[in-house]
Image (cartoon, grey):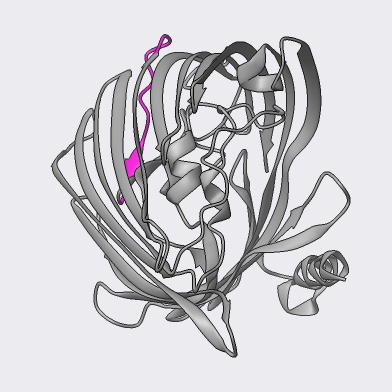
Amino acid sequence: MKLKLLAVAVAAVISTPAFAETEVKTKAGGGAKFKTDDVSIKVGGRLMYDIDWFDDEAFTGNTGSGSDSELRRARIYVSGEFGDWEAKVQGDFKDDGDTALGDAYIQYNGWDDLELVLGKHKEPFGLEEQTSSKDITAIERTMITNALAPGKNYGASLGSFSNEFTWMVGVYDHGEEGNNIATGVTGRMTFAPMVTKDEVFHLGFGFRQSRLAGNEYKDADQRLEIHTADEKVGSGTIVGESITAYNFEVAYAAGPFHAQAEYFDAEVDGGINADTDISGYYAQFGYVLTGESRPYSKGKFKRVSPKGENGAWEMFGRFSHYEPGSDEADAFTLGLNYYASKAVRVGVNYVMGDMTEGNVDKDGNAIAVRFQYVF
């Protein structure tokens, strides 16, 4: 039903008579924009197809090997602007044929330097999480980001955004506690003391607190940054009354070089049970071999945009560490990205993984390939 409704919305936008004489602009990797004097509508989306190969215990749970492929993301969105208001609806189409709403929000921009967002949108926590999946350097986000960043939920947030300084705080619906909402509060602030066309220095801090109300915190179990792998690291079932988490972020970019790192620390309040600590960090370095730089805008980084007809090449390395309770895991990734255009990207990642669960050590190797098209 959600798929049908979204298809009807897109068709209505394109075919309605009100847009018969409208200005239409298309841009590779930037969607199609339909604009009249006072209304603009934008339609776009993304496709990501992944192929993974992996072996040994850190990825398969045994000494064997495995491989898999999947349509990692298939999304289409419609957004619109009218005066001080804008809105966005995005459909996520799953590999199993199911559909879900990604973004579904209304935003008010009528106050000076303030944005009010109502509906389902991404909670402000973590640099890697705030960077779009089409713009992150590696194929997958790190274990600690996936474990602690809340992602997209229904709620209300208020924020202000510029290249030099951003802040956003919101209250969100994280499920039910009896007949009441299990609320979460999330906030992020960034500061860039240096922002020029060729150089950026970025600092940030995030906070989140969510009620669990005696339920299990399921996001603690994580794969070692290969999405189709069979094995996960985790400390078994983590049940608690609430979770409180902090993160610190730093990034620097100069010409074709870019680097970023984040540290996370969280505690699950176990109530009558013992508390559980969840922590981790990552550090990532990259270099664009063809000379392009990674763009920065309002506390987030964008993907490389090639300048020449032959595209752009980027190499990077990343180390991430994750500790859910008494267990721990490390993943070291080497990667190469080819940006054929603003719309087309091919990425190859080699991942070495190592985990310790109790007294059992597991390691393994994996290769992931992604084909990405943004429209």
Locate residue 47, reporting x and y percent.
72, 39
Query: From what the image shows, is residue 30 above or below residue 53?
Result: below
The stretch in magenta equals 288-298
* Residue 86 visible in rendering: no
- Tell me which residue sits at (28%, 55%) in the image: 206
152 to the left or right of 59: left
Q: For the C terminus, which image quadrant? A: top right
Query: From what the image shows, is residue 15 above or below residue 96?
Result: below
Q: For the N terminus, which image quadrant? A: bottom right
Query: From what the image shows, is residue 329 above or below residue 326?
Result: above
Residues 10 and 221: in front is 221
- Tell me which residue sits at (40%, 20%) in the image: 318
Residue 148 drawn in magenta: no
- The quadrant holding residue 20 is bottom right
Magenta part mainly helix, strand or loop? loop
Locate residue 88, reporting x and y percent.
59, 68
Locate residue 353, reporting x and y percent.
53, 17
